[in-house]
Image: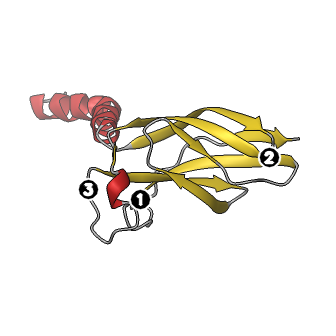
Amino acid sequence: MRTLSHLVVAAALAATPAVVAAVSAGHHAKQPAISISKATPSGRIVAVRVSIARYRMYPALVGKKTNRADGGHWHLIVDGKYNNFSAKETTGKTLKLKPGPHKIVAELANNDHSSLTPAVRSNVVRVRVP
């Protein structure tokens, strides 16, 4: 025979995945994010278009020691190595790249060029430089 407490426990256990998903979605919704929407080679330089959410750009503070919790700038990482940075909200450019295929990632950064903790990186985009 089931008691009321057994039913309450069973209902709580059944709801746990939904509760965890809702809490996780709410938590991640408040985190900063960056994604690359377009990467276009022009000669040996690649122009990159990004979308940034919940993180402001502070161009005048790039390189300063005073970090802001709500923003900074972003880095371009090419083939796993730092290449360049941008403090523009939607666009950036790589430095000159060697001809051939490359993997590009954008990463949000603090004013002092350190990575956020945890790091916030975009999707990987593959391009071929002529």
Locate residue 84: give its quadrant. bottom right
Callout in the foreground (2, 1): 2
Q: Quadrant of the C terminus?
A: top right
Q: Residues within 10 Å of mark 2 (few under 14, many from 20)?
A: some
Rendering colour mode:
secondary structure
Which residue sits at x=29%, y=31%? Answer: 22
* Residue type beneath disc 1: Pro
* Residue type beneath disc 3: Ala
Circles 2 and 1: CB atoms closer than 8 Å = no
Q: Nearer the viewer, residue 103 or 72?
A: 72
Residue under label 1, please give it: 118
Q: Please tell me which of labels 2 and 3 falls first in the chain.
A: 2
Callout in the foreground (3, 1): 3
Going by the image, does 105 lie left or right of 52? right
Circles 2 and 3: CB atoms closer than 8 Å = no
Residue under label 3, please give it: 69
Q: Please tell me which of labels 3 and 1 falls first in the chain.
A: 3
Which residue sits at x=81%, y=41%? Answer: 43
The local secondary structure at tag 3 comes to loop
* Real-space CA distance between mark 2 and mark 3, rounded to the nearest whole angstrom: 35 Å
Q: Please tell me which of labels 2 and 1 falls first in the chain.
A: 2
